[in-house]
């Protein structure tokens, strides 16, 4: 139906008779019975000069045939790639009429997100959405090429599986053939990719669809896509090497610059310096240890096991109302309060100065590297709380927009194996329960489990966790030892994970793997704050699909066939 795409025409095409197809982006009257009609497809817009265009309306689908010619002198549009040419002597075939669009089909639009998602088929025509989805395709293609070049085999794993602990709630699917029984939709292919290693696949990958019933936010959806990978006879360094090469290849395919080598940082260092296990290293404002600087202080607010601070450059003029909001934020995050000091020129100002000794008044600004007109924020308390609170304040006050500061990748390693104790005093896994403990810490597993490091590692991009991975437990004795810590006795372990434990008894190679979110990677490369902008048909933050009306009730006959009955919501 067409000889050229709308955005392809250039002065070198002058004199050719062409046919283009697309949507009417705009129509401008030009004298009696003559109009300039902009026709749009995913490549761009071309201006067509049409006689008798009165019946054409915005978003009509048309086929235009005419002759390419240079625009008259002084009428070229430098803002369009096709701005030096137009299509004249046009005949127009209306392929489909359209109602007026619910919002402008423009690069950026201020329409309510629910309205955009309810009419997503119109929203997808916008240039920004076209770019984002095509960028996603480019990234996915680059990932596949890189993995295949490194010897990985793409294998599909099941979508209907047994429920297993993955850290979030499962979406469950009732079985018609086994009434009262349920499948779960996969939170990840974790156990199946380990079974593939036992089966000798050696290097597996998949662009896997995963589903988790968890609260939604800007970087999280119920269903998402991740690169899932596993390697046999591999350790942490091997996995980091493979994934680094793949991520770098994907970023460069997207036209962005990135270094060959990705820096690494331990979890402990990330917490100490940035107060986060996914630090945004695009800007400074690092956490500074002040405990020694105020040792022996008489000021009770600073009498704590840990005292740290951050320097906020040039913010000495911050008003009291904003500081009070920061204080409330710190308290909501668990701090007892927030101490602030200002460098008014060379002079230190603060309501707490009367409680500080001369040595402390000198030591605090010096330790924080304070300069004139800086704001200093200090938090005291238990170390994990201090790190977390200051890490949040650091992001609140210094984090640049997602599309600024370049591409800053970072590997975070040596995570704790356990993140705390539950109500019964049992350790809580920081990752999934199939993560191998650090070999140097195995002797502390019984006496000091919370001090044991895992062989787990995360990849962070501009403060977003792209993904995580670990060296897996491949020995049944170590796996049962971890299960026992979690209160899972051998009988229960066999009942819940028997297929995996049985497989290990038939010869499991040492193996390790990783998975990272493609939605998050593409969003960052596209300069989007929300992954919904790089997903064709996302859910809203409340988990609703305005386009199809999901979730919704099902026919009572379906429920009866499944042996299910909907109970009233508890009051």
Image: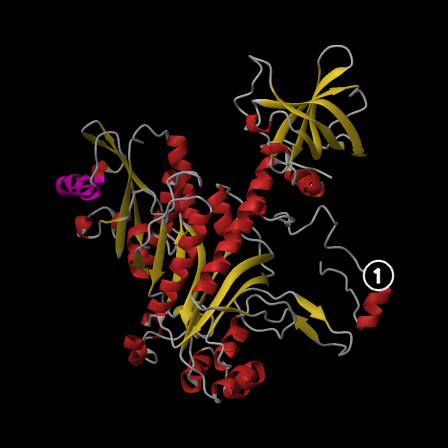
* Residue 388 shown in magenta: no
* Residue 363 shown in magenta: yes
Q: Quadrant of residue 508?
A: bottom left
In the image, residue 34 lies at what x, y percent?
74, 15
Q: 426 or 35: which is nearer to us?
A: 35
In the image, residue 441 lies at what x, y percent?
30, 76
The residue that appears at 35% across and 59% down in the rendered structure is 412
Q: 5 or 227: which is nearer to us?
A: 5
Q: 227 or 447: which is nearer to us?
A: 227
Q: Residue furthest right?
A: 557
Say if 238 sits above or below 58 in the image. below
According to the picture, the residue beneath numbered tag 1 turns out to be 555
Q: Quadrant of residue 124?
A: top right
Count all numbered tags in the image, as a single digit. 1
User: Which segment is the magenta one?
Assistant: 355-368
In the image, 262: left or right of 178?
left
In the image, residue 388 lies at what x, y percent?
37, 52
| Quadrant of image for the N terminus | top right
In the image, 214: left or right of 200?
right
Say if 235 sits above or below 569 in the image. below
What scheme was used to colour the molecule? secondary structure
In the image, residue 134 lies at what x, y percent?
57, 45
Q: Quadrant of residue 19?
A: top right
| Residue 304 at least partly seen | no
The residue that appears at 29% across and 31% down in the rendered structure is 314
| Residue 567 at least partly seen | yes
The residue that appears at 84% across and 61% down in the rendered structure is 555
**Mark 1, other Cα within 10 Å: few <14 / some 14–19 / many ≥20:** few
Q: Residue furthest front?
A: 15
């Amino acid at each position: 139906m067409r000889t050229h795409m709308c955005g392809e025409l250039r002065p070198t095409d002058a004199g050719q008779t062409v046919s283009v197809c697309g949507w009417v982006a705009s129509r401008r009257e030009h004298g009696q019975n003559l109009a300039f009609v902009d026709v749009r497809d995913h490549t761009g817009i071309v201006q067509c000069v049409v006689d008798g265009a009165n019946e054409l309306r915005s978003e009509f689908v048309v086929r235009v045939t005419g002759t390419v010619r240079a625009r008259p002198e002084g009428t070229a549009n430098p803002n369009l790639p096709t701005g030096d040419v137009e299509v004249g002597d046009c005949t127009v075939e209306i392929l489909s009429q359209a109602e007026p669009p619910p919002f402008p089909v423009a690069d950026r639009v201020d329409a309510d997100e629910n309205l955009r998602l309810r009419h997503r088929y119109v929203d997808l025509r916008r240039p920004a959405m076209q770019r984002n989805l095509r960028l996603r395709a480019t990234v996915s293609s680059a990932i596949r090429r890189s993995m295949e070049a490194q010897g990985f085999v793409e294998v599909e794993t099941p979508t209907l599986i047994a429920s297993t602990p993955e850290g979030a709630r499962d979406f469950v699917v009732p079985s018609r053939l086994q009434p009262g029984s349920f499948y779960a939709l996969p939170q990840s292919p974790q156990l199946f990719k380990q079974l593939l290693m036992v089966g000798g696949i050696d290097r597996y990958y998949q662009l896997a669809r995963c589903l988790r019933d968890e609260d939604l936010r800007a970087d999280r959806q119920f269903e998402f896509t991740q690169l899932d990978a596993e390697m046999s006879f591999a350790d942490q360094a091997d996995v980091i090497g493979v994934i680094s090469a793949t991520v770098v290849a994907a970023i460069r395919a997207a036209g962005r610059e990135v270094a060959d080598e990705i820096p690494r940082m331990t979890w402990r260092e990330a917490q100490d310096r940035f107060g986060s296990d996914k630090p945004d290293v695009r800007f400074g404002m690092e956490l500074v240890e002040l405990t020694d600087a105020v040792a022996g202080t008489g000021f009770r607010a600073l009498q704590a096991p840990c005292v740290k601070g951050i320097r906020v450059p040039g913010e000495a003029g911050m008003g009291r109302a904003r500081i009070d909001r920061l204080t409330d934020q710190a308290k909501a995050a668990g701090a007892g309060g927030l101490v602030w000091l200002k460098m008014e020129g060379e002079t230190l100002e603060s309501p707490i100065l009367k409680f500080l000794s001369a040595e402390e008044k000198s030591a605090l600004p010096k330790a924080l590297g304070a300069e004139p007109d800086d704001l200093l924020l200090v938090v005291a308390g238990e170390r994990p709380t201090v790190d977390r609170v200051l890490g949040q304040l650091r992001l609140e006050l210094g984090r640049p927009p997602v599309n600024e500061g370049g591409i800053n990748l970072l590997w975070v390693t040596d995570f704790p194996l356990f993140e705390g104790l539950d109500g019964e005093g049992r350790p809580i896994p920081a990752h999934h329960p199939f993560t191998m403990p650090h070999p140097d810490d195995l002797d502390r597993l019984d006496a000091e489990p919370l001090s044991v490091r895992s062989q787990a590692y995360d990849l962070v991009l501009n403060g977003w966790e792209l993904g995580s991975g670990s060296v897996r437990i491949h020995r049944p004795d170590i796996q049962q030892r971890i299960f026992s810590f979690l209160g899972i006795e051998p009988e229960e372990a066999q009942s819940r994970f028997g297929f995996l434990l049985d497989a290990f008894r038939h010869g499991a190679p040492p193996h390790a793997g990783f998975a990272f979110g493609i939605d998050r990677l593409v969003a960052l490369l596209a300069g989007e704050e929300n992954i919904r902008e790089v997903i064709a048909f996302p859910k809203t933050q409340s988990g609703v699909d305005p386009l199809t009306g999901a979730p919704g009730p099902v026919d009572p006959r379906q429920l009866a066939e499944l042996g299910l009955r909907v109970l009233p919501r508890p009051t």
